[in-house]
């Protein structure tokens, strides 16, 4: 056999073998013999040499944390710490942070003290900028492109909202002559700014075009007791409170709603690809976790005998941390994988790639 014929025969045999393997894998997945999510997790874990590895973090007075890219932002009572992807402390900002809050979206996070006047914004590369307002901070929200929205007390009005660009430049401001600005957020794309106001008659949802001064569209929330708003994307705005969770489009037309009149709302978590709602159906400890798509269609439901130590979601995945177990679910709440951990009073930070960072005591451990 000539060398050309040998090479041709070798490659034909190789291609045939690969085809058989591919067909076999598809059949196994379709018949349920192999869980494709488990396969995905196994490949990820096999290629990530840092899975199960740990690094030291501040264990004293931890308040909150956020996974920013490969980095970690840790908020404690005494400082703000940023760790790089290798677990090295790259910077620390000392201060009195007791009572401080941390808001995160994508690769951005903002820390602030309610009633204070300063905010500290971080990206996946570390500290990005500091923002200051002229009155006491009521609340703040950062979006996935680093735009910071701050609601604050302005003496001449009932309140004001200021939007800062990802460079820390004040780019837009509105004044609240009628109604306190309870919550506000700039859309992740485009120029829309959503504001939730409380006034004597109830609550009102407003959307502004940040290239203009006047309100573009508004909606009175009759009979509602709203608490928060969040954009999923440029065309979907989620608003929730004790009576329900409602999804609106960019013009405040209702897309869907989940009623909560007869239950006790625990929390709502909003990410670009899905949202989760957890609630208690009665006085017992049982917790119901529901996953919904961007149009409020139910994707999955999970009943928990008690509230987890921590719940975190990002990308297409959700992490549930219990005292001795870390479980990773997909957006349909199908279990992908689990790990035995020792994380009493710990915190789980889900990353978009399916890996999870678990904080417990003075250690941070990577799983996935």
Image (cartoon, rainbow, N blue to C red):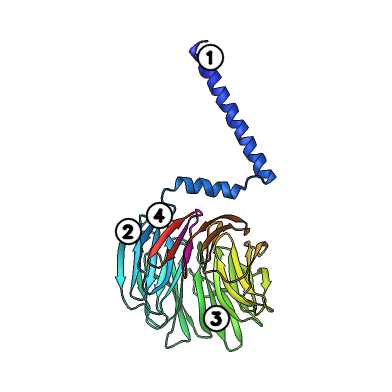
Is 214 drawn above or below residue 336 in the view shown?
below
Tell us which disc is closer to us: 2 or 1: 2
Which residue bears the numbered disc 3?
197
- Left or right for 101, reference 264: left
Sequence-first disc among 2 and 3: 2
Tell us which disc is closer to us: 2 or 4: 4
Which residue bears the numbered disc 4?
53
- Left or right for 264, reference 104: right
Between 292 and 336, the residue placed more toward the observer is 336
Is 116 drawn above or below residue 91 in the view shown?
below
Label 4 residue SS:
loop
Sequence-first disc among 4 and 1: 1
Disc 4 and disc 3 in contact, CB within 8 angstroms = no
Q: Quadrant of residue 53?
A: bottom left
Label 1 residue SS:
helix
Q: Residue furthest top?
A: 1
Q: Which residues are magenta?
A: 346-357
Which residue bears the numbered disc 2?
88
Q: Position of residue 69 (x, y in %)?
A: 42, 57
Disc 4 and disc 1 in contact, CB within 8 angstroms = no
Q: Position of residue 49 (x, y in %)?
A: 42, 48
Q: Tag on residue 5?
A: 1
Q: Tag on residue 295?
A: none
Say if the magenta span includes residue 351.
yes
Rendered residue at 43%/54% (across/down) = 52
- Left or right for 67, reference 235: left
Tell us which disc is closer to us: 4 or 3: 4
Sequence-first disc among 4 and 3: 4
Q: Residues within 10 Å of mark 4 (few under 14, many from 20)?
A: few
């Amino acid at each position: 056999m000539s060398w050309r014929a040998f090479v041709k025969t070798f490659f034909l045999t190789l291609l045939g073998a690969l085809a058989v393997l591919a067909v076999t894998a598809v059949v196994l997945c379709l018949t349920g013999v192999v869980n494709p999510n488990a396969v995905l997790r196994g490949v990820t874990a096999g290629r990530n040499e840092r899975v199960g590895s740990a690094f030291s973090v501040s264990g004293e007075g931890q308040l909150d944390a956020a996974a920013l890219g490969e980095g970690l932002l840790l908020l404690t009572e005494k400082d703000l710490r940023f760790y790089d992807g290798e677990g090295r402390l790259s910077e620390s900002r000392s201060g009195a942070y007791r009572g401080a809050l941390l808001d995160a979206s994508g690769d951005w996070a903002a820390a602030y003290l309610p009633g204070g006047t300063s905010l500290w914004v971080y990206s996946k590369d570390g500290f990005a900028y500091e923002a200051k307002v002229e009155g006491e901070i009521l609340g703040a929200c950062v979006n996935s492109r680093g735009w910071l929205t701050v609601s604050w007390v302005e003496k001449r009005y009932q309140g004001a909202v200021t939007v800062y660009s990802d460079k820390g430049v004040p780019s837009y401001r509105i004044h609240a002559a009628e109604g306190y600005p309870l919550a506000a957020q700039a859309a992740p794309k485009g120029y829309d700014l959503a504001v939730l106001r409380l006034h004597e008659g109830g609550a009102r949802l407003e959307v502004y075009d940040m290239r203009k001064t006047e309100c573009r569209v508004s909606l009175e929330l009759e009979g509602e007791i709203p608490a928060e708003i969040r954009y999923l994307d440029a065309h979907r705005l989620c608003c929730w409170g004790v009576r329900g969770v409602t999804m609106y489009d960019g013009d405040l037309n209702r897309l869907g709603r989940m009623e909560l009149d007869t239950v006790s709302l625990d929390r709502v978590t909003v990410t670009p690809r899905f949202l989760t709602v957890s609630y208690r159906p009665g006085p017992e400890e049982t917790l119901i976790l529901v996953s919904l798509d961007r149009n409020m269609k139910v994707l999955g439901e999970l009943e928990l005998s008690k509230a987890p130590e921590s719940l975190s979601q990002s990308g297409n995945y959700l992490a549930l941390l219990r005292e001795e177990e870390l479980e990773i679910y997909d957006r349909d709440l199908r279990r992908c994988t689990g790990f035995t951990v020792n994380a009493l009073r710990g915190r789980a930070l889900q990353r978009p790639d399916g890996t999870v960072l678990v904080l417990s005591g003075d250690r941070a451990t990577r799983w996935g």
